[in-house]
Amino acid sequence: MEHTDVVVIGAGPMGATTALALAREGVRVLLVNRSNWTAPTPRAHITNQRAVEVLRDLGLEQDVRREATPWEWMGDTLFTTSLAGPEIARLRTWGTGDHRIGDYLQGSPCPMLDVPQDRMEPVLVRHAAAQGAVLAFNTEYLDHRETDDGVEVRLLDGPGGRERLVKARYLVGADGARSKVMENTGLSVEGTLARAGTVYVLFKADLARYVAHRPSILYWIVSPNAAFGEIGLGLLRAISPWNRWISGWGYDMSKGEPDTSDEEVLRRIRILVGDPDLKIEIENTSTWFVNQAHAPVYSKGRVFCGGDAVHRHPPSSGLGSNTCIQDAFNLAWKLAYVIKGHAGPGLLASYSLERSPIGAQVVARANQSRLDYAPLNDSFRDRSADNPVLAGLAQLASPGPEGQSRREALCRALELKNYEFNAHGVELNQRYVSAAVLPEPDAGEEVWQRDAQLYLQATTRPGAKLPHVWLVGRDGRKVSTLDCVGKGRFTLVTGLAGQAWVQALQDLKLPWLDGLVIGTEGALDVYCDWQRAREIEEAGALLVRPDAVVAWRHREAVSDAAQARGLLVQALAAILSTSKEPA
């Protein structure tokens, strides 16, 4: 029997990120994948700022950026009759618009990126292997059996190959929406599966003449010449600008399987583009189903599940792979700390408590984003006409009262779509509640100053991500507060006046606990932005987890080192679920 610390099933965004983060911390990890390599098709692509922050912490940001469509090209999402036909509207998306770019730049040191999954996964896997993760591709997970001191995982090497039995301390199921690990563990999802169907076609065609002057990654098409299913729009999604694309449209599941013959697929793509003679090379045609389901519990015993196994939803809002990556980042440091003896097993209970509400939120938001296309469709459709789109578009362009009313409705409908395409708060306002976060008894409920879905509210309240502000480092270059924490370690953050906390750190000498004294050389608050953002006195303190989440804060100044040490030891013991002084 083979032995390792953690077996991870699935090499997608959740599994590969988990393996990488564990291997970086010196944890023995076996990454198992059923196929012979990573995702063969683009699949997920929007990579939001929080996910890029995770990649930055893991040392991958620059490698991933080389694979990405840059932020400035993600741009103006178009609603048009075809790429060659008249435009209906544009929406500035993914924070690129003049009204929102400042919010995004203030919220994170990282850009938004568009990284198709078939480019993201190889980067994650290569880095995991470089850090020491053992890879087992062409290997199928069969089942597992939990024992008193671990999990015995049964694997099959290759089709018709030999069986292997691997003993691990923990098992991670990141094996997607048909998760066998979930099934064998007795975990389940709640909600509706396969409530709508969609055809996706990966193809090559040179569309630069239609789009290079108005770059975007999403072009939504409403045509009088074709129906496009549930949301009423066809899609052209840029994969490699501007010659590799995905086209998509919905179909009526009650009428059976859609026509995906080459003839029909080519016909529809040419309608979407508006070019009946377009040269097209079809690479792949597939169908997928719109799901609205999530798992209320992500773990049982020594088995932890994440990614698409536990939250199943359409790609609307671009939250899928981002949530998978963040599941992994939350889980990996906790497994590492327990395995290395820094924390008690009770810490692991916080994974499901923290991530399950996020999964539920993401599933609800993605499905609501699909429903929010209804007002947009109503603004350019006259449903009483024989050809609702043709009649509606004519009315939309008319100078009379009907046209004015429709144009006002279109404006309101576009505003609603900001909840899909400019939802900065959905992406960055996550708040964790668990025993791994110590609440302030007198803090009260958080009061949101602006719409919590649209706008980031940076805060040092326990459970929130540490706010990003720019400091100045030793070489005079700017460094983010987020660059000063993480890397698998806890960080105690205080100010120049917080010398009692500095002394407490020196007394404890914990190898996994760093100190960040803002105001000293290497972390100068020259803009005074940290002073505005910290929400504590200069001699107060924040305890930041390896995932950059504030675990505890002491707002009041402390001048006595013994008091600071006692407060810190007490907080660490509670967060790490250990009854003894941390070691």
Image: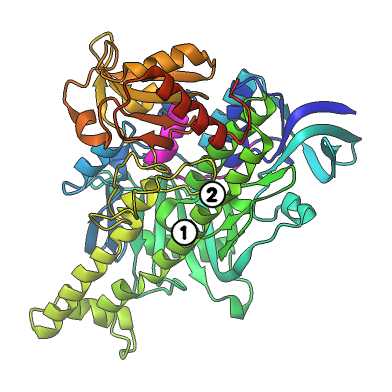
Q: Name the secondary structure under disc 1.
A: helix
Classed neighbour count for the residue bearing mark 2: other residues with Cα under 10 Å, few (<14), some (14–19), many (≥20): many
Q: Position of 64 compared to 84: left or right?
A: right
Query: Exactly how many numbered labels are in the figure?
Result: 2
Quadrant in the rendering for residue 371:
bottom left
Taking 546 as reference, is 75 left or right?
left
- The three-letter code of the residue at mark 2 reads Arg
Instruction: Measuring from the top left, give residue 111's x and y in whole percent.
Output: 33, 35
- Name the residue that disc number 2 marks: 355
Does dot 2 land on a helix, a strand or a loop? helix
Q: Is residue 52 magenta?
A: yes
Nearest to the observer: residue 553 or residue 378:
553
Please name the residue shown 8% across and 79% down the image. Answer: 399
Q: Which residues are magenta?
A: 38-57
Residue bearing the label numbered 1 = 361
Q: Is residue 67 visible?
A: no
Q: Is residue 514 above or below residue 11?
A: above
The disc placed on residue 263 is none
Q: Quadrant of the C terminus?
A: top right
**Could you say where residue 314 lies in the image, as x and y percent from the top left?**
50, 60
On screen, residue 179 above or below 478: below
Mark 2 or mark 1, earlier in chain: 2
Question: Outermost residue toward the bottom?
Answer: 384
Q: Position of residue 475 (x, y in %)?
A: 26, 8
Q: Quadrant of the N terminus?
A: top right
Residue for point 45% across, 51% down: 319
Q: Is residue 439 magenta?
A: no
- Please tell me which residue lies in front, 563 or 277: 563
Mark 1 crowdedness (10 Å alpha carbons): few <14, some 14-19, many ≥20: some
Label 2 to label 1: alpha-carbon separation: 10 Å
